[in-house]
Amino acid sequence: MPAPPALYPDTELVAFYRDHRLSLVRLAVLLVGDRETAEDVVQDVFARLHGTWRPGVTTLAYVRTCVLNGSRSILRRRAVALRWRERVTDLVDSAETAALIGESRREVLLALALLPRRQREALVLRYYLDLPDTEIAEIMRVRQSTVRSTTARALTRLLRELGDNV
């Protein structure tokens, strides 16, 4: 007699979501600049994973890459929208978000938002997630030497943007 089908076939995916959702949302916040959009990015990634989840095969690095790509898509859409607007007054979307982020964190986020996409991604993956060059290179799909040079240029520019606020 065959085994009965599992009542909850996605228990591994649910456990993975529970274990990594917060860190993935934090990663996305640093890339897109606000929590609500970051949560949407992570939810979209897990919704897409629902049909393709393979326990033991789908890695955290792969899911981080998906979050990174989802964040890139959001940023591209924002860039197109900004071209049609006259002016952006503030990078923080709501008073609640501004209250949650301390003033110094807000300054860093604003300076981080001024960096080119690749530099911002390299800094977030290196210093927020504390990933090694090999994993960053894999996620960003570049060579390790590119990761190192991009990170160095990003730090120099970030420090210049922050000026006396460091």
Image (tube, rainbow, N blue to C red):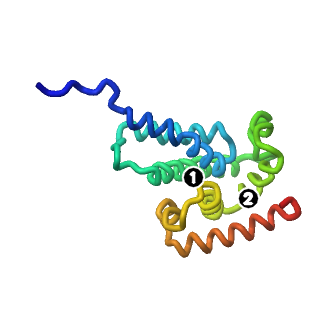
Answer above or below: position of 85 versus 9.
below
Asked if residue 119 is positioned above or below residue 106 in the image, the reply reads below
Is 123 positioned to the left or the right of 134 in the image? Answer: right
- Give the SS element for disc 1: helix
- Mark 1 burial class by Cα count in 10 Å: few <14, some 14-19, many 20+: some
Query: Which residue is the site of mark 2?
Result: 114
Q: In what quadrant of the picture does the C terminus appear?
A: bottom right
- Amino acid type at image mark 2: Leu
Q: Nearer the viewer, residue 82 or 40?
A: 40
Q: Quadrant of the N terminus?
A: top left
Q: Image point 58% across, 40% down: which residue?
A: 22
Q: Is residue 13 rendered to the left or right of residue 143?
A: left
| Residue 103: x %, y % from top left | 83, 46
Residue at 77% x, 42% y: name it.
101
* Residue in the foreground of this view, choosing between 1 and 58: 1
Q: Is residue 109 visible?
A: yes
Q: Which mark is residue 72?
A: 1
Q: x and y percent of residue 6 in the render?
A: 28, 27
Looking at this view, name the residue that lies furthest to the right: 164
Residue at image point 44% right, 36% down? 15
Q: Horizontal and vertical percent for residue 8?
A: 34, 27
Numbered marks: total: 2
Question: At which x and y percent is residue 65?
Answer: 49, 53
Task: Report which quarter residue 161 is drawn in.
Answer: bottom right
Q: Is residue 21 left or right of residue 86?
A: left
Q: Sequence-wise, which precedes: disc 2 or disc 1?
A: 1
At label 1, the amino acid type is Arg
